[in-house]
Amino acid sequence: MVKFGLQFKATLENVTNVRPLGDDFRWFLKLKCGNCGEIPDKWQYVTLEESVPLKGGRSSASMVQKCKLCARENSIDILGDTINPYNAEDSERFKTMVQFECRGLEPIDFQPQAGFAAQGAESVTQFPEVNLQEKDWTDYDEEVKESVGIYEVTHQFIKC
């Protein structure tokens, strides 16, 4: 089993505490089979709330799948206690947002979508519906009368 960290990077304007919202947040990933190298064309997602027992019954994972090419059973599990917010002081730097424990799989790409939340950097304004699918998001913080935004979203995976 190998742990991979998803590192997030963005330019933040007047927001902080960018984070996935809820146990049903969908992490959209492209996963490569460690046995044969097969990479499915479609995005697959994993959530904290889903748990599937592994063969042998000793543990579970967020997703268990059989490779379509080599038929090997692989799994990926979200390590819930590793989820960290991306804050204003992290702006324009890579920071690990979550770790995945993988057996036979390697995450190679991430597609941010809806389900993120953020908070005003100089206010208590909450932004509960941040969609990062376009790699940019903008809004307006009425409390401090300033525009807010998340720009140039990018990512990388690291071995932990």
Image (tube, rainbow, N blue to C red):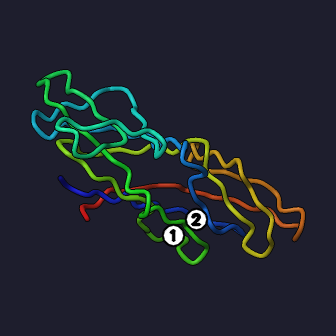
Residue at the image point whose x is 61% and y is 42% from the top: 114
Would residue 125 appear left or right of 106 to someone viewing this image? right
52 relative to 114 in the view: left or right: left
The answer to whether 92 is drawn above or below residue 100 in the figure is below
Verify CB contact (< 8 Å) between mark 2 and mark 1. Answer: yes
Location of residue 10 with respect to 42 vertically, above or below: below
Q: Residue furthest top?
A: 68
Q: Which residue is depicted at the point 77% across and 76% down?
A: 122
Q: Nearer the viewer, residue 29 or 139?
A: 29
Q: Position of residue 145 (x, y in %)?
A: 89, 67
Q: How many marks?
A: 2
The answer to which of marks 2 and 1 sits earlier in the sequence is 2
Looking at this rendering, what residue extends furthest in the front direction? Answer: 57
Q: Residue at x 41, y 65 (%)?
A: 96
Closer-to-camera residue (23/116)? 23
- Mark 2 element type: strand
Q: Which mark is residue 1?
A: none
* Local secondary structure at mark 1: loop
- Residue at image position (26%, 46%) is 59
Q: Position of residue 68 (x, y in %)?
A: 20, 21
The quadrant in which the C terminus is found is bottom left
The residue singled out by tag 1 in the image is 92
In depth, the one of 131 and 50 nearer the eye is: 50
Amino acid bearing label 1: Glu
**Local crowd size for mark 2, using a 10 Å CA cut-off: few (<14), some (14–19), many (≥20):** some
In the picture, residue 95 is in which quadrant? bottom left
Name the residue beneath numbered marker 2: 11
